[in-house]
Image: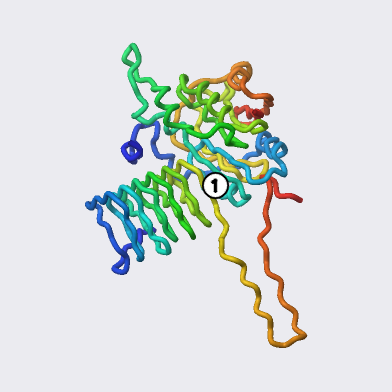
């Protein structure tokens, strides 16, 4: 069974704790209590445990939801809704994983990475050719273009 | 309010689906026609009115479309919308339901996947909900809906629909919602009178597929 992550190197809000206000930090966070307001973890990850009840907009690198959220999720890298998740609010992220059984109401906005493509380093020998950078292909419409 | 409703093990009509939820794959002429109509269109905005479907989310977002999900059938059974009618029987507070659901901008959606939701919704909600959908769709937008035929019977099983290709659907048994009514073709035409075009397709499993264009 996939248990929510909770270890000593993660800040932990227990299920009896209630927080109202703006929550921000520079470490990973595990929330199993109640949070109302906003949560901003920038480049860190947030896990909302099975007893977690969040009424807030959330911003983090990675967001994993086992509990209940009423608010928008902005996961710069990834958002995952586990089967027990109840998410009411919009989701913006690069990658999304939703387990069967999760409840979701809102919009999903998949954002491609803003990081610029790295140019290949030119080799020292003058007669070697540079390799081409890969580009992602788009698939317009619901039908793949033949 | 949302947290109170979403306690697991609520009313019988929101019971957990049977264990094993085997999936059936079938061809959908309505879906095939919908794909023909929208062929070549990019970055569409799609509204799915069924239960949260990971395959649908994956299928549509991988193709660059924006995705909205709103399980209006489940919402319609939220105790927060239940009132008593003149005879003391439970009824739906239609005004409150419409004020708190499908709150979208005008002309926002290119595609609406209504599945067979209208067949299972409480009667007073159906027409106002369809009218609200019409207002939220762009001109030229397409709505796909399924309606059971009379042969389906009142115990017609409720399925979740998952996109499985340009003309295929995966059907998965869902919670045991009860079929509320059977629409005939005239009723369906009346229901979608705000739409410009309507097309019928007969599917197997006693279902008519209907494609309407805003």
Residue B17 shows in this picture: yes
On the image, the x and y values in percent for residue B112 come to 58, 35
Residue lying furthest bottom: A125
Q: Looking at the rendering, which quadrant does residue B188 occupy?
A: top right
Which of the pair B19/B203 is nearer the observer?
Answer: B203
**A126 displayed left or right of A77:** right
Looking at the image, how many numbered discs can be counted on the residues? 1
In the rendered view, tell whether residue A140 sits above or below residue A10: above
**A125 displayed left or right of B20:** right
Which of the pair B159/B30 is nearer the observer?
Answer: B30
Which of the pair B135/B3 is nearer the observer?
Answer: B135
Residue A1 shows in this picture: no
Which of the pair A17/B26 is nearer the observer?
Answer: A17
Pointer 1 indicates a residue of which chain? B
Which residue in the protein does label 1 denote?
B57
In the rendered view, tell whether residue B203 sits above or below residue A25: above
Q: Say which element carries label 1.
A: helix
On the image, the x and y values in percent for residue A41 come to 38, 60
The colouring scheme, among rainbow, by chain, secondary structure or one colour, is rainbow
* Quarter the N terminus of chain B occupies: top left
Crowding at dot 1, Cα within 10 Å, few <14 / some 14-19 / many 20+, comes out as: many
Residue lying furthest left: A16
The residue depicted at 56 percent of the width and 65 percent of the height is A115
On the image, the x and y values in percent for residue A14 come to 25, 56
The residue depicted at 48 percent of the width and 39 percent of the height is B51
On the image, the x and y values in percent for residue B120 come to 49, 27
Residue lying furthest front: A22
* Quarter the C terminus of chain B occupies: top right
In the rendered view, tell whether residue B128 sits above or below residue A80: above
């Amino acid at each position: 069974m996939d248990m929510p992550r909770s270890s000593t190197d993660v800040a932990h809000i227990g299920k009896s704790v209630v927080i109202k206000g703006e929550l921000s930090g520079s470490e990973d966070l595990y929330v199993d209590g109640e949070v109302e307001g906003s949560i901003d973890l920038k480049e860190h990850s947030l896990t909302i445990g099975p007893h977690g009840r969040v009424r807030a907009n959330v911003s983090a690198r990675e967001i994993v939801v086992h509990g209940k959220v009423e608010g928008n999720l902005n996961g710069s890298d990834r958002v995952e809704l586990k089967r027990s998740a109840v998410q009411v609010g919009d989701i913006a992220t690069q990658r999304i994983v939703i387990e069967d059984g999760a409840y979701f109401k809102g919009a999903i906005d998949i954002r491609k990475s803003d990081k610029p493509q790295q140019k290949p380093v030119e080799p020292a020998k003058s007669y070697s050719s540079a390799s081409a950078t890969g580009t992602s292909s788009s698939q317009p419409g619901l039908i793949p273009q033949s | 309010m949302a947290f109170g409703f979403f306690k697991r093990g609520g009313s019988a009509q929101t019971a957990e689906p049977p264990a094993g939820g085997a999936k059936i794959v079938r061809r959908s002429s309505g879906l095939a026609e919908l794909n023909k109509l929208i062929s070549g269109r990019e970055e569409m905005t799609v509204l799915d009115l069924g239960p949260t479907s990971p395959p649908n989310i994956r299928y549509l977002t991988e193709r660059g479309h924006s995705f909205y999900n709103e399980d209006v059938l489940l919402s319609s059974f939220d105790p927060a919308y239940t009132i008593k009618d003149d005879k003391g029987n439970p009824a739906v507070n239609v005004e409150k339901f419409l004020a708190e659901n499908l709150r979208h901008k005008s002309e926002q959606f290119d595609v609406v996947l209504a599945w067979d939701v209208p067949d299972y919704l409480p009667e007073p909600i159906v027409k106002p909900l369809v009218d609200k959908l019409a207002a939220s769709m762009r001109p030229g937008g397409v709505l796909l809906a399924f309606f059971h035929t009379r042969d389906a019977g009142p115990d017609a099983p409720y399925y979740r629909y998952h996109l499985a290709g340009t003309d295929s659907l995966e059907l998965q048994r869902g919670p045991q919602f009860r079929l509320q009514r059977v629409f005939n073709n005239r009723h369906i035409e009346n229901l979608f009178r705000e739409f410009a075009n309507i097309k019928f397709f007969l599917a197997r499993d006693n279902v008519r597929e209907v494609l309407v264009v805003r």
